[in-house]
């Protein structure tokens, strides 16, 4: 397993300013917490270090919002949030032991189990992918649905990411073999938009706020929307549990009190989201999250994505099976391996969260 690269942004609960974080294979990484290694701190019960597959993505909004509302601190747990461009990189950081938690799509827990790694979702933040398939204006006439993926260059956040998984599923579902199109890792935000405008990709899968910025710039069109429950059912056949906090099962078993505090805080954050409007939620987020398109566009991006979030952190009924059916449709490892879905998530902690 490769060591992950440079962190693009780091946030923490208990500190101010940026210091150097000494993680394996990482140089010049910034931290807003103390300079001691996250893994050592967590072993003492001091700090839990969590890698997020894009802190400024709206699909992962509950993590930063929960921190900004002070809920982690109220629960008595110190959390250090790090960020990488894609969920697959968060998964890499987790299994390599550099962090104690990862925030990414639940589907990584199945993929990792098939590879012999036992991780589990401890709280489910999203019930739908929250993702959108967009197409460039130039390619719009020839790319109107996944059935047209053949021969196209399609943007994903990273190879092996959840957007990559979903793109492959949509292709196979519509009669296109995964070898008949080219997935291109373009991240999100400006890198995705630039690739779309320059023609490096014909279309691709991304979420907000990138979607809103593409539409505002008239740089592309939406051909498939999986932000709402109805959109998820239409595209994938059911609710698709997505953003989650997942951890190594062995770490969860050895740190149940700490995990309970984390889940308590995140469930409070999810309830707060369900009780407030997009404008109020956006106002709590770091101002730079709106820099790509301005405040109004960011508020709209939050509003468009809100239907994806759970209200209580509970795994949606039937969700794991939907994810399994999606992944095994194109993933040989999952076709040939029996995945124990009961071991890919737990409701132990959300049931106790107040």
Image (spheres, grey):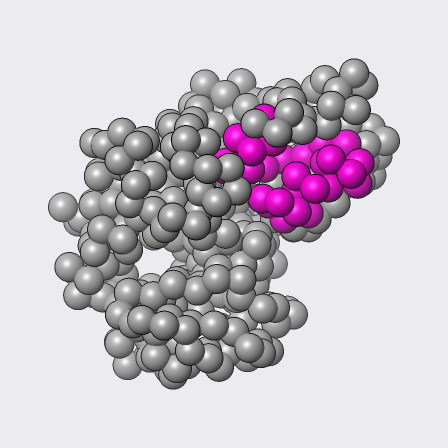
Work out whether residue 295 or residue 92 is closer to the camera in this orientation and state it. 295
Q: Quadrant of residue 76?
A: bottom left
- 184, above or below 98, in the image: above
At 31% from the left and 48% from the top, the residue drawn is 65
Q: Is residue 350 visible?
A: no
At 15% from the left and 59% from the top, the residue drawn is 74
- 185, above or below 252, in the image: above
Q: In the rendering, at what x and y percent does residue 347 appear?
A: 29, 46
Q: In the rendering, at what x and y percent does residue 245 appear?
A: 39, 53
At 30% from the left and 41% from the top, the residue drawn is 283
Range of magenta residues:
186-215
Q: How many marks?
A: 0
Q: Is residue 115 magenta?
A: no
Drawn side of residue 266 relative to residue 198, left or right = left
Drawn side of residue 102 relative to residue 257, left or right = right
Q: Quadrant of residue 168?
A: top right
Q: Is residue 10 visible?
A: yes
Work out whether residue 118 or residue 243 is closer to the camera in this orientation and state it. 243
Drawn side of residue 281 relative to residue 298, left or right = left
Q: In the rendering, at what x and y percent does residue 270 appear?
A: 27, 41
- 44, above or below 191, in the image: below
Drawn side of residue 307 relative to residue 328, left or right = left
- The quarter in which the N terminus is drawn is bottom right
Q: Is residue 193 magenta?
A: yes
Q: In the rendering, at what x and y percent does residue 298 appear?
A: 43, 35
């Amino acid at each position: 397993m490769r060591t992950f690269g440079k962190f693009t942004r780091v946030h923490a609960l208990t500190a101010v300013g940026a210091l150097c974080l000494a993680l394996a294979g990482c140089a010049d990484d910034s931290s807003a917490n103390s300079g001691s290694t996250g893994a050592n701190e967590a072993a003492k019960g001091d700090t839990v270090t969590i890698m997020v597959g894009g802190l400024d993505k709206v699909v992962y909004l509950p993590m930063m919002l929960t921190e900004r509302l002070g809920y982690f601190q109220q629960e008595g747990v110190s959390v250090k949030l790090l960020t990488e461009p894609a969920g697959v990189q968060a998964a890499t950081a987790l299994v390599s032991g550099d962090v104690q938690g990862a925030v990414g799509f639940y589907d990584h827990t199945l993929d990792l189990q098939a590879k012999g790694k036992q991780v589990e979702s401890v709280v489910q933040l999203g019930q739908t992918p929250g993702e959108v398939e967009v197409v460039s204006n130039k390619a719009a006439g020839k790319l109107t649905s996944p059935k047209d993926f053949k021969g196209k260059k399609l943007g994903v956040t990273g190879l092996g990411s959840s957007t990559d998984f979903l793109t492959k599923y949509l292709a196979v579902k519509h009669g296109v073999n995964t070898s008949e199109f080219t997935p291109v890792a373009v991240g999100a935000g400006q890198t995705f938009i630039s690739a779309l405008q320059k023609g490096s990709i014909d279309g691709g899968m991304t979420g907000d706020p990138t979607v809103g910025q593409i539409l505002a710039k008239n740089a592309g069109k939406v051909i498939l929307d999986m932000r709402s429950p109805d959109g998820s059912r239409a595209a994938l056949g059911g609710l698709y549990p997505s953003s989650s906090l997942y951890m190594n099962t062995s770490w969860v078993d050895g740190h149940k009190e700490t995990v309970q505090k984390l889940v308590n805080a995140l469930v409070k954050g999810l309830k707060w989201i369900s009780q407030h409007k997009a404008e109020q939620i956006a106002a709590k987020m770091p101002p730079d999250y709106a820099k790509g398109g301005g405040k109004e566009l960011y508020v709209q991006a939050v509003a468009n994505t809100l239907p994806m979030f759970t209200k209580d952190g509970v795994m949606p009924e039937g969700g794991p099976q939907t994810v399994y059916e999606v992944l095994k449709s194109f993933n040989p490892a999952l076709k040939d391996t029996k995945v124990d879905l009961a071991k890919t998530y737990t409701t132990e902690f959300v049931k106790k969260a107040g």
